[in-house]
Structures are given as C-alpha cells and as structure tokens.
Amino acid sequence: MPERPAYKNHPLWESAMALTRGAYALAERVRDASPDTARRLRRAAVTVPAHVAGALSEGPDKSREHVLAARGAIAEVARRGVAGTGPPGGDSRADGPLRVRRGRAGPMSDEKSPRPSLFVALFLILVLAAAALWLPRWWENRLFRQAEAMTGVGSRVLPGDVTRARGKINPGDPGRRVSEAIGRPSFSIGTEGSSTHEIWTYYYADGTMTVNLTDGIVARVSISYGPPKIPTSARR
C-alpha cells in the first residue's frame, strides 16, 4: 500500500480540502438556479488543494508558482461564491445565466437561497486558507530581514572620517562615552551571558572602525582604510 504523502498531514492542505468541500456544498445549492456559476465554483475550488499540495512538496522555484496559483484560485472561489448567492435586494443582478427581474423579490427560480451559516463558514475557510498561504511568506521575509540586519545589510555611512573618529575614543572608555563622542554605530551585534560582548561597527567614507566592548567597556579598537564594504541584500 503506497505511503500517504506528507503534505496530506499538513494543516494547510486540510484547510484547502475543507474549503473545497464547502465550495462544493454551495455549488450544489445554487446548481439549479445558476448551473454555470456552480460549475465555475467547483472548478476553481478543486484547484486549491492541488496547488497547495504542490507548494508543500515541490522545490522553492516551483513552490512559489503553486502559491501564486493557489492565491488566484482562492480569490476565484470567493468571487464565484458571492456571485452564487445573488444580491438580496430588489434591484438584483446575477453572474452567468442566473436571471433576475428588477423590482421583484428574487430570481425566477424556486430554489431556496443557501443558508447564511454556509456562507459564513465558507468565508472563514477562505480567510484561514489565504492567511495560511500569506503568513508563512511574511514570516520568512521577517526572519530574513532580521538576519540581514545582524550582518549590517544596508548600514548607513556616517559623516566625518575614520581617523578623526578614532582619535576621540580609547580602550577602557565606557560605551556611553563612545556614543557621546562619535554617535551611534552603523550597526552593532552582541551576546549576553555571565559577561556581555558587543561589536560596534562604524562606516565612514574613507574607512571602517570596529569597536569591541566587554561588559560595556571598550576592549579593543581597530580601523581599516578604504571604502567601506557594506553587505548588500541577497534578495531583490
């Protein structure tokens, strides 16, 4: 017996299947009044779990394509689901072949309108599925930006020159005095524990100065001349 694919245990795929089942239930309810809307709704809904499965199982390049396709399918399900309900007022219009008379109470069909609870459930599933597709990407970008910040990506070049800045600080100075003398660094990193260690990096047009601090006291200062080599983002 073939092993169950790993993506089928993922909550995102389970949400996509729930979305498809809800959309199929709605399509069944509007089928008599608007068969074209029902058909399009089913066709859009069935592609959502397929693309979610691809996003979860394919490589990075193909995964992004599936994510974009799944987003489009979710939007289409939402549009067709709203079209299938029909506006509630007398000046109604319908999507596709569902015919409606102006000034009358509703469509020319005796089919009962779908229950509001079904629409609410479908809407909630749409929101959850969309969030599941968008949030991982947002979280990934957030972590990537944090990682870039730790390496100094996009750090600013400070005014002045590195030699003059070096003459204003010395080993043994407290970190507060360094900040008062030459300002905040272009970027800094540090570790905590029984003893704290920090590295402050100052970029100037003519060079780079690195200040190592231990427990808030300058332990070492080093400079290198030449245009600063500021890291750039790997993403565009």
Image (tube, grey):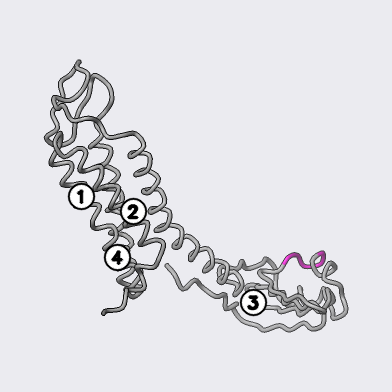
Task: State which mark lies toward you, 1 or 2.
Answer: 2
What residue is shown with label 2?
18
Instruction: Evaluate if marks 3 and 1 touch, with contact meaning CB atoms under 8 Å apart.
Output: no
> Which of the two marks, 3 or 1, is nearer to us in this view?
1
Seen in the image, is 205 located left or right of residue 177?
left
Q: Quick one: label 2 or label 4, which is nearer the N terminus?
A: 2
Numbered mark located on residue 42 in the image? 1
The residues tagged by marks 3 and 4 sit, at their Cα atoms, a distance apart of 45 Å
Q: Which mark is residue 175?
A: none
| Placement of the C terminus among the 4 image quadrants | bottom left
Residue beneath label 4, please? 65
Q: Residue at x 72, y 75 (%)?
A: 190
- The foreground one among 42 and 103 is 42
Q: Nearer the viewer, mark 2 or mark 4?
A: 2
- The image quadrant that residue 154 belongs to is bottom right
Q: Nearer the viewer, residue 94 or 216?
A: 94
Q: Which region of the structure is painted magenta?
A: 180-184
**Residue 192 on image: x %, y %:** 76, 75
At a point 13% along the width and 36% down the height, the residue shown is: 32
Q: Are marks 1 and 4 in contact (CB under 8 Å)?
A: no
Instruction: State which mark lies toward you, 3 or 2.
Output: 2
Labels 1 and 4: the sequence-earlier one = 1
**In which quarter of the view is residue 99 placed?**
top left
Q: Mark 2 to mark 4: distance in Å?
A: 22 Å
Distance between mark 1 and mark 2 Cα atoms? 13 Å
Q: Amino acid at mark 3?
A: Asp
Tag 1 secondary structure:
helix
